[in-house]
C-alpha cells in the first residue's frame, strides 16, 4: 500500500467511522440511563432513512437544483429522518420498555423485548415500504469539493462527516452543559438517588431515547444517501455500531465516538490489506482485543463518571 | 429431570414423524383439487426474490383456474424456506407430507435445493427450479432424481463472461468480485478459470452481500489498475458498488450476470450503471408479445412489475399445468415427474427441456448493456465474439 493509498483509505475510514459513532451514541446513551442494550436502535436508524425518503418523495427534487435548493432538500430530508427516528425511539420507550420498568422486570426481559421490537419493526417496514431497496433521489451534484492528504472528498462524504461532527459536538454540549444533560448524568450515576433529588426519571429516560433516536435517524438518512435504504439496512451497521459502543466503553458518550471512528478505520483498512470478506471479522477482533485488555472499554464505562 | 421429560416426549414424536414420512410418497389426486407448491424465501432477508417467483406461480394457477380447461381445481401452497439450507428440509417435508401436492416449483436457491433434494428424490415429488443455478446440483452422483433445473447453470454464464473479456475487450487484468453466496462464488469460480485459460491476469476478491459501504471496495478496484471488472452477485449490492465505482473514478468495463440483470439495478444506481454489461441465459423477453401480456397481467394482479425469474416461475407452472391437463384427472407424483422430465415446453422466456440428469438443455448466453437508462439487448455472446 503506497502512502497515497493509505491516506485514501484513512479518509474513507474516518468518514464511515463518523457514522458508526453517531449510531453508537444511541446505544450508549440508553445503556447509560437504563443499563439496557437497546437492540431495536438499528431499526430506529432504518426508519430514519425511510423518513427522509418519504419527505423527499413529497418534495421530489428537480433535476440540477441550485445550491440553495440543494441545501433546502438536504435540510428537509434530515428533518424527516430526525422526526422519524425521534418518534420511533420515543414510541419504543413508551410501548416496549416503560411498562416493563413499571413492573420492575428483570434485565433479561428488557433485552428480549428489545430484540422482539427490532424484529417487529423491520418486518413492519418491509411490509409498508416493500422489500426492495430504494435510493434517495439526487439532491445535489455530487462532485469532489476538497482534497485531504491527496484524497478527494465529495459532497456526500463531506455532508456525512460534517453532520456527524456537528451532532456529536451538540450532544457533548447538551450532556455536559444543560440541565437535561445534568439529569441524564444523574440518572446514569444512580437513578434512585437522582429521583430523590427531584429528577423526573421518566422524563429524562424518555428524552434520552428521543435524543438517541434523532441522531440515529439522521445517521439513517446519511447512510441511505451514501448507499441505499432497505428494511434490513439496520442490522449490520447496528451490530457494528454496538461493537463500537462497547469498544469505547458502553455508557460513555465520548467513548462511543472514539470507538466508532476506530472501528470505521479498521474496517476500511481491512479491505486493501485482507479483503472485503474480513471487514466484519476485523471489527469484531478489535472488540475482542479491547475487551481482553480493557474490559471496561477504551474510555471506561459510565456516562456519569467519564463524560 | 427436564432432559428425561424431553427424551420421553421426543421418542414418540420422532416415531410419528417417521411414520408420516413413510406415507408421503405415492399419493396423488383425490377429489377435485390438485395443489402446486412453491418453495423459496417467503420471509427473511431474501423475501423479494421469493415473492417474485411466488407471484409468477400464483398468476399461472389463477389463470388456469379462470380458463376452466382443467377438470380439477388447482390450489397454491406456499413453502417458506427463507432461502436457507437448514430451513429447506423442514419446508420440503411439509410439502411432501401434503398428499394433494403433485409438483413443486423451486427450491429457489441453490443451497436450499442441495439440502431439500434428497427428501424430494425419496418421495417422488417433482421439483422444477426456476433459479437454482449452481452447476453441481445436477451431478448424477447426488441422485437428486426429482430435481429438474429450469435454467441454464452458472458454467455457461461464467464462461461467456471470460470469452467476452478475452476476445472482444482484450482485457489484460480483470478484477473479479463475488458476493460469497453459492450463486456468486460459483459464477466467479467458472469465470476465473476461463480468464486464466485465456492468459488474463485476475485479481479475485469477495465482498459479502449487504456490505454497508462500498467506498473502500471501489477504491481497491481503481488502485488495482484492472481494466475490467466482473461482479458476481445480485443487483441490491451491484447498484451501490456501481455508484461508488463511478465516484472513485473507475473507467474500465464492468460485467455482471443474471442476478444483476434487472431494471431495479438501474433504478437503484442511476446513471452509474451506464455501459455496464450484463449476461443472462434468457433472451430479451420484453420485446415478445406474450411477455408483454404477462407483464400487464402481473402488474394488475400484484400491483408491481414482474421481477427476476417471475416469468420463469410462471412458465414452469404452466409447463406443469400442461402436463396435468394431458393426464386427465389421474395425476400421480411419479408419473408427473417422469412426464415433465421428458417434456419440452415453449414458454414465454425460453423453451424448457431437460437432459437425463434433469439439467436444463440449451447453453446460449445473451449479452445486454445498460444504455441510456435501459437494459439494451446486444445478442448471443458466442455470435458477438465471432
Image: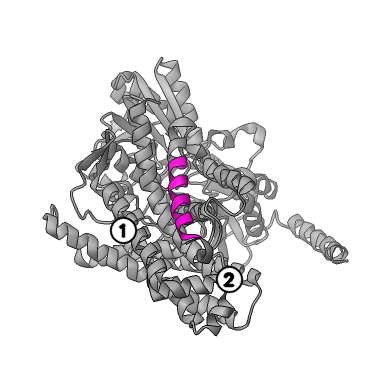
Where in the figure is residue B363, as x and y percent of width and height? 43, 31
A286 to the left or right of B375: right
Other-residue count near label 1 (Cα within 10 Å), few / some / many at <14 / 14–19 / ≥20: few
Report the label total. Answer: 2
Report helix, strand or loop for mark 2: helix
> Does residue B358 show up?
yes
What is the span of residues highlighted in magenta in the rendered image? A252-267
Q: Which mark is residue A113?
A: 2
Residue located farthest toward the top when viewing the structure as drawn: B199
Q: Quadrant of residue B258?
A: top left
Where in the figure is residue B242, as x and y percent of width and height? 31, 40
Where in the figure is residue A299, as x and y percent of width and height? 52, 53
Residue B186 falls within the magenta-colored stretch: no
Q: Which residue is mark 1?
A: A166
Report helix, strand or loop for mark 1: helix
In the figure, A159 relative to B110: above or below? below
Residue placed at 41% from the left, 67% from the top? A176
Q: Nearer the viewer, residue A14 or B269?
A: A14
In the figure, B2 relative to B360: above or below? below
B54 to the left or right of A72: right
Main SS, magenta residues? helix
Residue A266 falls within the magenta-colored stretch: yes
- Same chain? Circles 2 and 1: yes
Please say if the residues under marks 2 and 1 sit with CB atoms less than 8 Å apart: no
Residue placed at 43% from the left, 25% from the top? B203
From the image, state whether disc 2 or disc 1 is nearer to you: 1
Q: Chain of mark 1?
A: A
Amino acid at each position: 500500500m503506497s502512502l497515497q493509498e493509505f491516506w485514501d483509505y484513512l479518509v474513507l475510514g474516518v468518514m464511515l467511522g463518523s457514522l458508526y459513532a453517531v449510531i453508537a451514541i444511541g446505544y450508549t446513551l440508553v445503556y447509560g440511563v437504563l443499563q439496557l442494550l437497546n437492540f431495536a436502535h438499528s431499526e430506529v436508524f432504518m426508519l430514519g432513512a425511510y423518513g427522509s425518503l418519504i419527505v423527499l418523495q413529497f418534495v421530489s427534487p428537480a433535476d440540477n437544483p441550485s445550491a440553495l435548493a440543494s441545501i433546502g432538500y438536504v435540510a428537509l430530508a434530515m428533518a424527516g429522518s430526525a422526526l422519524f427516528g425521534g418518534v420511533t425511539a420515543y414510541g419504543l420507550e413508551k410501548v416496549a420498555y416503560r411498562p416493563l420498568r413499571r413492573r420492575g422486570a428483570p434485565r433479561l426481559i428488557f433485552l428480549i423485548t428489545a430484540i422482539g421490537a427490532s424484529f417487529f419493526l423491520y418486518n413492519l417496514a418491509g411490509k409498508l415500504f416493500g422489500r426492495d431497496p430504494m435510493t434517495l433521489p439526487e439532491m445535489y451534484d455530487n462532485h469532489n469539493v476538497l482534497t485531504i492528504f491527496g484524497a478527494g472528498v465529495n459532497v456526500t462524504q463531506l455532508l456525512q462527516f460534517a453532520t456527524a461532527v456537528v451532532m456529536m459536538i451538540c450532544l457533548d454540549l447538551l450532556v455536559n452543559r444543560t440541565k437535561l444533560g445534568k439529569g441524564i448524568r444523574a440518572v446514569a450515576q444512580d437513578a434512585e438517588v437522582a429521583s430523590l433529588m427531584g429528577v423526573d426519571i421518566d422524563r429524562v429516560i424518555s428524552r434520552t431515547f428521543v435524543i438517541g433516536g434523532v441522531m440515529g435517524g439522521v445517521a439513517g438518512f446519511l447512510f441511505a444517501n451514501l448507499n441505499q435504504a432497505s428494511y434490513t439496512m439496520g442490522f449490520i451497521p447496528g451490530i457494528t455500531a454496538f461493537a463500537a459502543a462497547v469498544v469505547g466503553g458502553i455508557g460513555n458518550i465520548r467513548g462511543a465516538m472514539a470507538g466508532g471512528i476506530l472501528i470505521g478505520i479498521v474496517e476500511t483498512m481491512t479491505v486493501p490489506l485482507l479483503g472485503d470478506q474480513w471487514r466484519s471479522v476485523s471489527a469484531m477482533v478489535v472488540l475482542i482485543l479491547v475487551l481482553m485488555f480493557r474490559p471496561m472499554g477504551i474510555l471506561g464505562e459510565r456516562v456519569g463518571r467519564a463524560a | 429431570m427436564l432432559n428425561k421429560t424431553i427424551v420421553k416426549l421426543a421418542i414418540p414424536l420422532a416415531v410419528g414423524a417417521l411414520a408420516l414420512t413413510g406415507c408421503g410418497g405415492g399419493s396423488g389426486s383425490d377429489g377435485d383439487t390438485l395443489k402446486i407448491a412453491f418453495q423459496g424465501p417467503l420471509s427473511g432477508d431474501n423475501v423479494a426474490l421469493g415473492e417474485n417467483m411466488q407471484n409468477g406461480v400464483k398468476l399461472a394457477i389463477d389463470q388456469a383456474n379462470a380458463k376452466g380447461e382443467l377438470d380439477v381445481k388447482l390450489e397454491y401452497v406456499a413453502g417458506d424456506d427463507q432461502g436457507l439450507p437448514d430451513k429447506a428440509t423442514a419446508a420440503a417435508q411439509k410439502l411432501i407430507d401434503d398428499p394433494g401436492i403433485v409438483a413443486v416449483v423451486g427450491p429457489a436457491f441453490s443451497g436450499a435445493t442441495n439440502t431439500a433434494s434428497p427428501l424430494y428424490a425419496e418421495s417422488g415429488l417433482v421439483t422444477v427450479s426456476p433459479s437454482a443455478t449452481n452447476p453441481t446440483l445436477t451431478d448424477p452422483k447426488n441422485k437428486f432424481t426429482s430435481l429438474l433445473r429450469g435454467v441454464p447453470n452458472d458454467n455457461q454464464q461464467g464462461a461467456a463472461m471470460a470469452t467476452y473479456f478475452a476476445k472482444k475487450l482484450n482485457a489484460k487484468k480483470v478484477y473479479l468480485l463475488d458476493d460469497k453466496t453459492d450463486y456468486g462464488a460459483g459464477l466467479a469460480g467458472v469465470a476465473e478459470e476461463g480468464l486464466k485459460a485465456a492468459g488474463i491476469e485476475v485479481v479475485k476478491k469477495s465482498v459479502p452481500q449487504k456490505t454497508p459501504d462500498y467506498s473502500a471496495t471501489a477504491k481497491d478496484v481503481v488502485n488495482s489498475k484492472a481494466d475490467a471488472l466482473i461482479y458476481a452477485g445480485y443487483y441490491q449490492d451491484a447498484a451501490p458498488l456501481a455508484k461508488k465505482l463511478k465516484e472513485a473514478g473507475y473507467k474500465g468495463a464492468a460485467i455482471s450476470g443474471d442476478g444483476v440483470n434487472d431494471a431495479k439495478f438501474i433504478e437503484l444506481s442511476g446513471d452509474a450503471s451506464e455501459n455496464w454489461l450484463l449476461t443472462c441465459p434468457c433472451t430479451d423477453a420484453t420485446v415478445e408479445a406474450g411477455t408483454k401480456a404477462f407483464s400487464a397481467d402481473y402488474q394488475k394482479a400484484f400491483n408491481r412489475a414482474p421481477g427476476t425469474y417471475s416469468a420463469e416461475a410462471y412458465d414452469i407452472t404452466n409447463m406443469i399445468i400442461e402436463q396435468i391437463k394431458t393426464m386427465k384427472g389421474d395425476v400421480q407424483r411419479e408419473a408427473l415427474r417422469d412426464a415433465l422430465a421428458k417434456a419440452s415446453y415453449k414458454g414465454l422466456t425460453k423453451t424448457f427441456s431437460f437432459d437425463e440428469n434433469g439439467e436444463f438443455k440449451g447453453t446460449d448466453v445473451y449479452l445486454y448493456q445498460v444504455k441510456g437508462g435501459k437494459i439494451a439487448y446486444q445478442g448471443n455472446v458466442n455470435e458477438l465474439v465471432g
